[in-house]
Amino acid sequence: REAARARHRRAPLCPASALLPRVAAPSRRSSGFAMGKVGALRKKYGKPKKSGGAKESKEEKEERASSPQIELLDDVCECTPAFKRALVELFARFDVDGDKLLSEAELKAFSRAANEDEREFAEEEMIEIKDFFDWKEGPSGAGLTLRGWMQMYMTQTQAREEETWEDLHRLGYNGQLKLRPAPSTKAEGELRAKLEELLALGEAGELKEFVDAFVAPDVDQEDREAFLETLSGKGAEEDTVADDVGQLQGLLAELRCCLTGDGVFKVEGDQEEGPATFHFRSPAPGMHHIDREVVFLKEEGRWCAEG
């Protein structure tokens, strides 16, 4: 087995079985700021929906399709200098502990980032990586070397170059293998000012003013009062007051994510005219594996949350 592994590592090409299709791993998501009566408001923290993670927008797909692409491999199927520089940068990006090896955890983090639906390498694929590409023991454990990382991408590019370009685009490169400016993941302009206002009102306990600033103009008075009672805990049973207070704090924590960009992995839409959708990891303790989605609208000239 060791002799066979050594032969594969010396060879410039690897067999088709090493081309590593990535298997989907489940991810979860819950969506939207709920509005309306108390029962509907509590659905906000109900069972989350399943999600495939952040997807490319139409604009991003059009940009990728229209961007001129340079060669990735030369005439003898070796990495071009530009491709090699990109692979070295990506290797360093995912080598979180800096040990010059990509561990199983680091490779799975790469797979989630490179795939549109956040798929991870399956166990059998990890075995193939270890068998066919340069895998070594290091001071902090075993991992894929830079040489093995390049072998893996050379193999994929020779067989399915379009998939390599998809990976590169999702990881921030354009068709000339230049890093694109990172898109903003926090609120800007008037929307930012609105979120700052909401946080100030909520943290000061001015809940009536908070509700008026938060909800859309067409929300009726009955629903506004129900929302206010829920956030304040008024009229609730003693054992549910803590839940209502927790809901207010959870709401403020999510607004803070949108304001600062903390945990936000994608912002879609128009932050000038709306709607603008923020996708982020739940800030609730122990809930970071849950994806949240919040939509802000501009109604009658002012920003508000979608009900």
Image: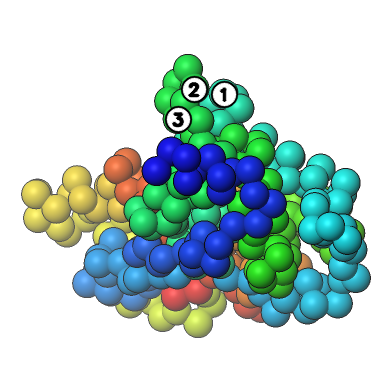
The 10 Å Cα crowd at callout 3, few under 14, some 14 to 19, many 20 or more, is some
The amino acid type of the residue labelled 1 equals: Asp
Identify the residue under disc 3. 142
Label 1 vs 3, first from the N-terminus: 1
Identify the residue under disc 1. 99
- Of the numbered discs in the image, which one, if any, rests on residue 138? 2
Residue nearest the observer in this picture, 250 or 92: 92
Q: Which residue is rendered at x = 79% and y = 58% of the image?
A: 77
User: Left or right: where does residue 178 sit relative to residue 282?
Assistant: right
Give the secondary structure at mark 3: strand
Q: Which residue is rendered at x = 86% and y = 51% of the image?
A: 80
Label 1 vs 2, first from the N-terminus: 1
Q: Which residue is rendered at x = 73% and y = 55% of the image?
A: 172
The 10 Å Cα crowd at callout 1, few under 14, some 14 to 19, many 20 or more, is some
Mark 1 or 2: in front is: 2
- 245 to 191, vertically: above or below: above
User: Left or right: where does residue 53 sit relative to residue 42?
Assistant: right
Q: Mark 3–mark 2 contact, CB under 8 Å?
A: yes
Give the secondary structure at mark 1: loop
Residue nearest the observer in this picture, 105 or 214: 105
Q: Is residue 54 visible in the rendered structure shown here?
A: no
What's the CA distance linking mark 1 and mark 2? 7 Å
Quadrant for the C terminus in the image = bottom left
Q: Mark 1–mark 2 contact, CB under 8 Å?
A: yes
Task: Measuring from the top left, give residue 160's x and y in whole percent.
Answer: 66, 71
Q: Is residue 81 visible in the rendered structure shown here?
A: yes
Task: Measuring from the top left, give residue 127's x and y in whole percent.
Answer: 40, 49
User: Left or right: where does residue 9 sit relative to residue 274?
Assistant: left
The amino acid type of the residue labelled 3 equals: Ala
The amino acid type of the residue labelled 2 equals: Gly
Give the secondary structure at mark 2: strand
What's the CA distance linking mark 1 and mark 3? 10 Å
